[in-house]
Image: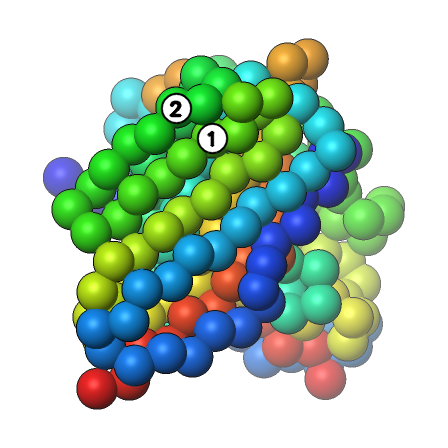
Amino acid sequence: DAGVIQSPRHEVTEMGQEVTLRCKPISGHDYLFWYRQTMMRGLELLIYFNNNVPIDDSGMPEDRFSAKMPNASFSTLKIQPSEPRDSAVYFCASSYRVTGELFFGEGSRLTVL
Amino acid sequence: TQLLEQSPQFLSIQEGENLTVYCNSSSVFSSLQWYRQEPGEGPVLLVTVVTGGEVKKLKRLTFQFGDARKDSSLHITAAQTGDTGLYLCAGRSNSGYALNFGKGTSLLVTP
């Protein structure tokens, strides 16, 4: 079975540009999580969804960040405008119950120049 | 957000040595998970512990959950080069659902 699929794997952009990261969770999983990983702060939870509905977005850094889940098989994380401090690896993870194992994608490495 | 402190931050040992890494918090967790992450990949679950004092073994890895469910340890016996990676602990509180991660222990096992 396919795991969590993220795209793009790498993104290099200039400050001020819009960035869209994409995620396809594992089929049948009804929880989807977006995390950001940096050396300084480790893995930080940004937002999570249950059955396509955002449950907790308290980790979203600021209004420049937004996330959507239009259906059970697709989610996006958008940053507009991007800033150099947004440079990080962004992970999407899914699980079939909120207390269960998280299955992570391979991550999207974002570099904002 | 519960703060999970992992120690040591970095560890470099030779193959065959034993090691222990720690995960500590001032908060009580309903459950705690350990993940391993290799370069360029996402974390992968190793184990979940839920009961205070619980000990789980996964081949050469032994995981322990503290009696008060505030801390955990991971012991590796006779480390191998394949154990190299970032070891992350992650906990859930009794009132929250989100999984909060520590910053991890980066382990390097050399031949």
Q: Position of residue B66 (x, y in %)?
A: 53, 29
Q: Residue A82's quadrant in the figure?
A: bottom right
Q: Residue A4's quadrant in the figure?
A: top left
Query: What residue is rendered at 44% in x and 63% in y?
Result: B86
Asked if the residues shown at circle 1 and circle 2 are in contact, with their CB atoms under 8 angstroms apart, the answer is yes
Element at label 2: loop
Query: What residue is rendered at 67% in x and 50% in y?
Result: B5
Rendered view: A78 above or below A84: above
The quadrant of the image that shows the C terminus of chain B is bottom left
Which is nearer the eye, A109 or A77? Answer: A109
Q: Chain of mark 2?
A: B
Which is nearer the eye, B96 or B22? Answer: B22
Q: Residue furthest right?
A: A63
Side of A58 where A54 appears, left or right: left
Side of B76 where B29 appears, left or right: right
- First of labels 1, 2 by sequence position: 2
Element at label 1: strand
Rendered view: A102 above or below A76: above
The quadrant of the image that shows the N terminus of chain B is top right
Q: Position of residue A22 (x, y in %)?
A: 48, 50
Q: How is the image coloured?
A: rainbow
Side of B9 where B21 appears, left or right: left
**What's under tag 2, amino acid-wise?**
Glu
Can see residue A113? yes
Rendered view: B4 above or below B6: above
Can see residue A104? no
**What's under tag 1, amino acid-wise?**
Phe
Query: Which mark identifies residue B54?
Result: 2
Q: Residue B14's quadrant in the figure?
A: bottom left
Q: Position of residue A62 (x, y in %)?
A: 85, 48
Q: Which residue is mark 1?
A: B65
Query: What residue is rendered at 28% in x and 71% in y?
Result: B17
